[in-house]
Amino acid sequence: MFKHYSTQLILLFISVFCFYESSSGQNTPIVFGAGNIDDMTITTSDSDGNTTGTQTVDGNGMLANLEASSRFLAQATLGSDYETIVALSGKSFNQWLDEQFNMPITMNIQQITQDITTMSVDSTFAMGGDPNDISPRRRFWHTAWWQYTMTSPDVLRNRVALALSEIMVISEVTQLEDEPLALANYYDMLLQNSFGNFRDLLEEVTFHPAMGLYLTHINNPKTDSTYNRFPDENYAREIMQLFTIGLYELNQDGSKKLDVNGNAIPTYSNTDITEFSKVFTGLSWGDNFVFGQDPVSEFSYLYDMKMYNTWHEPGPKYLLNGYVVPDRNPVDGMADIQDALDNIFNHDNIGPFIGRLLIQRLVKSNPSNAYISRVAGAFNNNGQGVRGDMKAVIKAILLDPEARTCAYDDDPYAGMLREPITRYTQVCRAFNAYVEENLFRNNMENFYDLTFQRPLAAPTVFNFFQPDYQPIGAIADADKVAPEFQLTNSVTIMGYANELHDWIYDDTQVMEHYSLFSGEGYDNSKYTKLDMSDELVLGTDDKINELIERLNLILVSGQMSEATRQIIYDAVIQVPEDQQGDVRVKLALFLTLISPDYLILR
């Protein structure tokens, strides 16, 4: 709250309105805030001099406006249109988060996948084909994911689920390539646990058969030295290294704990991996009757794995921080697993480790130690004594001063490179992609080939990129990280530009159309199109700057540089006004979306 009404009214006026500066004969909007206080003298009637006024105008205390709302939604969703940005500016971010937390899941991706399969079977039968030849296909899962992304209102949940899918990785690459129901069900599980407790999420991941197959702890038998057989260690290793606590002991602020010699302290040893591998034995398919069987059908992936105690490793298990799983008699594999998950969940590392990974996925690649500590603190205690509350963690990440203040806008190491998939979804959501058939068909094959990314398709369990990746050059020299740059090379740079060109200039290429069944045929009702009607009226000479500013708001959160703005203006103005007005709009959109101003989310 401001101390004096006079100051509040003056600063409210400043924070909302802007003025225009001439640039090459054109009016360019200049917005107060975001560090833009050069050559300004700021005074207020506050007793502390001009501190309150300065903080309001430099961005630290600026009232939420359209630009701030756009930036928040860029972090918290997979893309928003102009109307959504305007609507958010009329409420607090905290209120919006609470609304999203209270919003029920309205769609089921697995069910959509099955519905598409049924539609294909029925259509094939009607055409005289053999419906027995139709089973769930990978492109059905892809379409179901897009259907959810484009039509479901619980947009924060989907953003968090996508982030979690890049931490607790399974992939259609290798074993799950032909198991779309498994992929859809796993993603639904992430959606269902995005706002729950991390301990429950960890349990759901552990017992999901898709994870069991991917990290090979399904049909993992107990030790039999006569056959030189020992428990598989794959999941035991990755649940610690990648999903929960990482390689080294951490302080709450994410910095590494050091021993007396100044060396980092490992969180676990090979012995710990061996002991945990004993815990994750005896699990098999939930619809099987005998341990060691293959899945009965694609529906086997819809049931949690179940325990066969006769195949579970007996005896005590010596876990982290001196904890010992007791020697239960009779053997109780489920109780052993619960003990092991509790042991991991209560490790001091989990708050800073998971907190940093989620910050990197939602806000910035290089969070400060103080930012990590605040998020880890929310993980450790949500304010009511509850550990692992995902809602508290999400709020801590998205409402933190380091996420919200625009004082970081000019920091060269702030922000993050947008992932290819989030660029794709933002284009479609920002410009209200629609399809007459109301089914967003998209197999993303070309997109994957050109950008190396699509949901649940990472090349390894280490995701598409690693959290500590350092591209050679200025970033590595500054000892910073830029995970998404691991996907950035000559193929993906040009691939994204080519994909973007197709989305903008060809109505038939916004999403990769395909036939659901043999002989279906193509028609206009099946093609997804972008709705740029609001932008198309801004293609005239006198409105080009208004067009650029609209794109700046929707896509760049008001952070477009003057240099980029000028490049776009100079290119667009060369297109004759009386020839294909949409060419100007599409060119402006294309140039905005390939600009570094857009690609780096600050």
Image (cartoon, grey):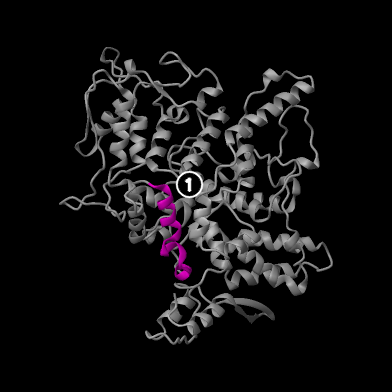
- Amino acid type, callout 1: Ala
Give the residue drawn at x 75%, y 64%: 584
Q: Is 575 or 132 nearer to us in this picture?
A: 132
Q: Position of residue 83 (x, y in %)?
A: 65, 60
One can see residue 365 in this view: no
Q: Is 309 or 420 nearer to us in this picture?
A: 309
Q: Is 389 or 570 nearer to us in this picture?
A: 389
Q: Position of residue 11 (x, y in %)?
A: 51, 80
How many numbered badges does the structure rendering display?
1
Q: Is residue 133 above or below residue 196?
A: above
SS state under label 1: helix
Q: Report the span colored magenta.
A: 389-409
Magenta stretch containing residue 540, yes or no? Answer: no
Give the residue drawn at x 38%, y 51%: 355
State the image quarter where residue 332 is shown: top left
Horizontal side of residue 335 vs 178, given as left or right:
left
Q: Position of residue 102 (x, y in %)?
A: 51, 49
One can see residue 374 in this view: yes
Q: Position of residue 75 (x, y in %)?
A: 51, 56
Magenta stretch containing residue 394, yes or no? Answer: yes
Q: Residue furthest left?
A: 260
Neighbor class of circle 1 (other Cα within 10 Å; few <14, some 14-19, many 20+) is some
Q: Main secondary structure of the magenta part?
A: helix
Horizontal side of residue 438 vs 146, given as left or right:
right
State the image quarter where residue 216 is shown: top left
State which quarter of the image contains the N terminus. bottom left
In the picture of the structure, the residue carrying the numbered disc 1 is 163
Q: Is residue 240 above or below residue 425?
A: above
